[in-house]
Image (tube, rainbow, N blue to C red):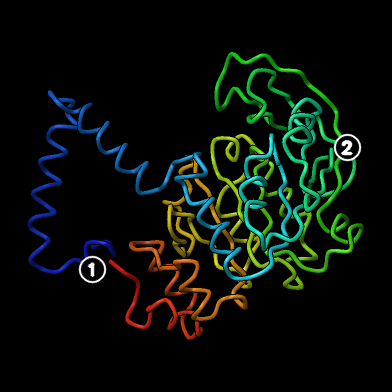
Amino acid sequence: MSTSTASLRPAARPVKALLARAIDGTVKQRRLGAFALYTVARRIVRAFENHDVDMTTNGERWLQGRLAARGPVDAMDVGANRGEWVEGLLAHRTARRVVCYEPVPATFRALAARTNDPRAILVEAALSASPGSLRLNAVLDNPSISSVYDIACYQDGHPIEPIEVPATTGDREMARLGLSHLTILKIDAEGHDLAVASGFAGALGRGAIDLVQFEVNQFTLAAHQSLRAFFQLFGEAYLVCRLLPRGLEACGYHPMLDSFSQSNWVAVRRAYLDAAAVRDLGLRAAGGEPGRALARALAGNRLATLLGLEQGAPA
């Protein structure tokens, strides 16, 4: 018997079995209404996994506000694009300094035209796992999906201009700028997010970054990476959470999370989390298999108590 079936209350098991038979009899057999059921199910999954790129509704603006309410914010915005994310953060008086990286020349010019706040430092370069240069596929009619990787995995038919751009690492940049601590590192690098985060290995290792926001999507697959690789990079020092519209959902790794659908994730430094931070960030434990994996990972840890995991993960 599977873990999920075993965890059901006895009265719920016959209902689940009946529902499974009804769905299988329609969907598997491709009977009338099968595709409609599939479409509804996909829409439910998209909502549950928060497949949303709108910063005003997917939780990004909410998270900026919560961090700003907690005190001064020092940030890096890697893949700043035209400045939407930094604009949202700079709307808060407690935003102290934001360093923005955008390697595509035309997009950087748009960023510079939009962002004239003295608290913002704009850098026309890419960040990666090691210094040097990167070959980028600049998308002329949709710069937001410019990527080191083949954009055909996301959307075909766009005019592409291959360009070489300078690259450095986050650790080098923090040293160059005299930054000893970041409240949040935001990464939106269209599949290169793991490489960017790896370039901050020193800062992550010494606990110099409180939160790391990153994306997982089709470009992650094109990069031959996975969400599991992020869990491995952040290790036991960070709690990996799905960003929700008004909260963070802490997860333990389970293969079901690696769907490569559009999603934003936030790794939170465990030492940063106390009862107030858990409340302020709307932090909760995931249900199902990711929740059970989290409960196992946090067994005996103070965070298990803060997240209410003493009796196991939520159903």
Residue depicted at x 29% and y 42%: 44
Residue that badge 1 annotates: 7
Residues at marks 1 and 2, CA–CA distance in whole angstroms: 52 Å
Q: Is residue 114 above or below residue 61?
A: above
Residue 190, horizontal then vertical, whole percent: 64, 37
Q: Is residue 112 above or below residue 73?
A: above
Q: What is the quadrant of residue 38 in the picture?
A: top left
Q: Nearer the viewer, residue 253 or 165?
A: 165
Residue that badge 2 annotates: 166
- Give the residue type at disc 2: Pro
Residue depicted at x 54% and y 39%: 217
Residue depicted at x 61% and y 63%: 68
Q: What is the quadrant of residue 36 in the picture?
A: top left
Q: Answer with left or right where residue 197 lies relative to residue 216.
A: right
SS state under label 1: loop
Residue 196, horizontal then vertical, whole percent: 74, 49
- Give the residue type at disc 1: Ser
Q: Residues within 10 Å of mark 2 (few under 14, many from 20)?
A: some
